[in-house]
Image: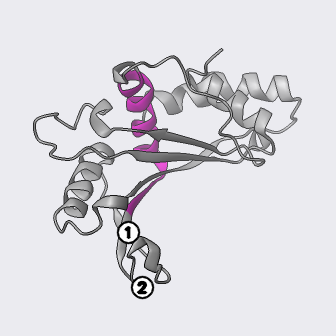
Amino acid sequence: MPNLYKKYKDEVVPELKKELGYKNVMQVPKITKVVVNVGVGKFLKEPNFIENVEKNLIKITGQKPVRTKSKKAISNFKIRENMDIGVVVTLRGPRMYYFLEKLLNVTFPRTRDFHGISDKSFDRQGNFSLGFKENLAFPEVKAGEVDKNHGLEIVFCTTAKSKEEGRMLLAKLGFPFAK
């Protein structure tokens, strides 16, 4: 069982239940899934780039990504219908908590010029989106092995009913929000 899950069950749930005034433990917000997404973008024509991105995501998440395809052709971006334009990984359960633990304890401290996360990326339902400009912040990716750097987007889906509840949940779990 991941340490972050134990912390959530033992510390975060009772605190949030008390602060939000819920009567039942099941009403307390929780993280349901984490989605890691990489768009191929300008390297679309390079044949090996999407394989390299897949290998990096396998190292980072420990799970095989799924390729996303374009739904329609867009001539200005030189995209044809059913062309591979990105890769995505959805993490749930224990693997999600291990990833979150690694993200909070290892990746954020390794990020260059890190001063905390902006809390402006919450949607109305309390889900949070976070972007990384480069994948070198993750310890599994070695700088010498990467020929082209790519960014990635991480979405934390929660059962929170509002932005405030989502922010409280993530702050209690240890997300370093900027002051």
Say what amino acid the circle numbered 2 marks.
Glu
View extreme (front): residue = 76
Taking the magenta stretch, the answer to whether it contains residue 99 is: yes
Which SS type dominates the magenta stretch? helix
Taking the magenta stretch, the answer to whether it contains residue 178 is: no
In the displayed structure image, the side of residue 28 where residue 70 appears, left or right: left
Picture residue at 54% right of the left edge, 20% below the top: 116
In the displayed structure image, the side of residue 159 where residue 58 appears, left or right: left
Picture residue at 68% right of the left edge, 34% below the top: 120
Which quarter of the picture shows residue 99? top left
Q: Disc number at residue 81?
A: 2
Q: Disc number at residue 177?
A: none
In the displayed structure image, the side of residue 89 where residue 14 appears, left or right: right
**Viewer-proximal residue among 44 and 130:** 44
Say what amino acid the circle numbered 1 marks.
Ile
Please provide percent x and percent y for residue 51: 20, 62
**Viewer-proximal residue among 114 and 128:** 114
Q: Is residue 50 above or below residue 75?
A: above
Image quadrant in which the C terminus is located: top right
Instruction: Look at the image and tell me whether residue 40 can be seen.
Output: no
Residue receiving disc 1: 85
Instruction: Look at the image and tell me whether residue 53 can be seen.
Output: yes
Contact, mark 2 vs mark 1 (Cβ under 8 Å):
no
Picture residue at 63% right of the left edge, 30% below the top: 170
- The boundaries of the magenta stretch are 87-108
